[in-house]
Image (cartoon, rainbow, N blue to C red):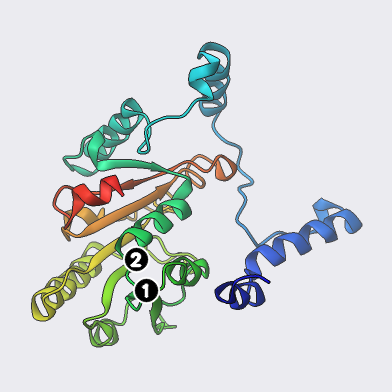
Amino acid sequence: MIAESMKALVKGSSVIRAMFEEGNRLAKIYGAENVYDFSLGNPNVPAPDEVNEAIKNIVDEEESVVLHGYMSNSGFEDVREAIAQSLNKRFDTHFNYTNIVMTVGAAGGLNTILKTIINPGDEVLTFAPFFGEYRNYVSNFGGKLVAVSPDTATFQPKFDEFEKLINKNTKAVIVNNPNNPTGVVYSEDTIKKLAKIMEDKQKELGIEIFLIADEPYRELAYDGVEVPYLTKYYSNTIVGYSYSKSLSLPGERIGYLVIPDEAADSDDMKSA
């Protein structure tokens, strides 16, 4: 018998994954060109040539025992430093390799950070509509996902409702910007309002509330729209990023967490 805790998850298994499998089944019958796949978000844009060439060079030139060997839990220092310097250049931040933890995609990163901060009974807030797997990520570690209802006219946050939902059990808020599934981008003014509410609630309740920025779609913003970098607005921010969308590499599962020194218990988080 499987664990009781898994029975509900199996019964309510991912509709997204189910649709992907159904799409594969139909493609075999009718041909892939006749089936439109709106499920997993596999890119139809190929990875950049530079990425493919870099992978080939690593396979051809790196020593096999290094290429296929274990590394430190946080990843190779030179890779983490390169990511930190790229962030500093683009967003005027001040990170170094110690602030970067390599992860198995953004999903792996979110699960890692939620496991690190959640105690049974803790609540994690997010804004509806949201990526359906958030509920599983939070419940994996005994937490409860609480959703702020959507403003279906604008899909911008309902701040009055958000503020009322924050309580002593609130451990984190997940913000997906740009948002999946709506495509909405939260502006700098919106992020500042969000950060102000969270700062005030931390002081009022005497607790730490983490802001988890889920950013696999960061580069998918158009017409000059800027996506704010959340660590600049709220000190207890953790960023999860993936190259699945920006470099069309979902199968490689390459991502990272950004854990600023200013975040509460940052040293313990980096080691967790």
Q: Residues within 10 Å of mark 2 (few under 14, many from 20)?
A: many
Q: Position of residue 190 (x, y in %)?
A: 24, 69
State the mark number for residue 109: none
State the mark number for residue 175: 2
Q: Where is residue 46 in the image (x, y as percent from the top left)?
A: 61, 38
Q: Is residue 1 left or right of residue 218?
A: right
Q: Position of residue 161 (x, y in %)?
A: 29, 87
Q: Is residue 258 left or right of residue 256?
A: left
Residue positioned 57% across, 26% down in the render? 52
Residue that carries the numbered disc 1 in the rendered image:
126
Is residue 269 in sight in this rendering? Answer: yes
Is residue 177 in sight in this rendering? Answer: no
State the residue lying farthest toward the left.
203
Q: How crowded is mark 1: few (under 14 residues within 10 Å), some or many (20 or more)?
A: many
Instruction: Quadrant for the N terminus, please.
Output: bottom right
Q: Mark 1 and mark 2 in contact? Answer it, CB < 8 Å.
A: yes
- Three-letter code, disc 2: Val
**Quadrant in the picture for residue 20:** bottom right
Residue positioned 17% across, 54% down in the render? 232
**Quadrant in the picture for residue 113:** bottom left
Residue positioned 60% across, 48% down in the render? 43
Element class at badge 2: strand
Query: Relative to residue 265, is residue 99 depicted above or below?
Result: above
In depth, the one of 105 and 249 nearer the eye is: 105
- Three-letter code, disc 1: Thr
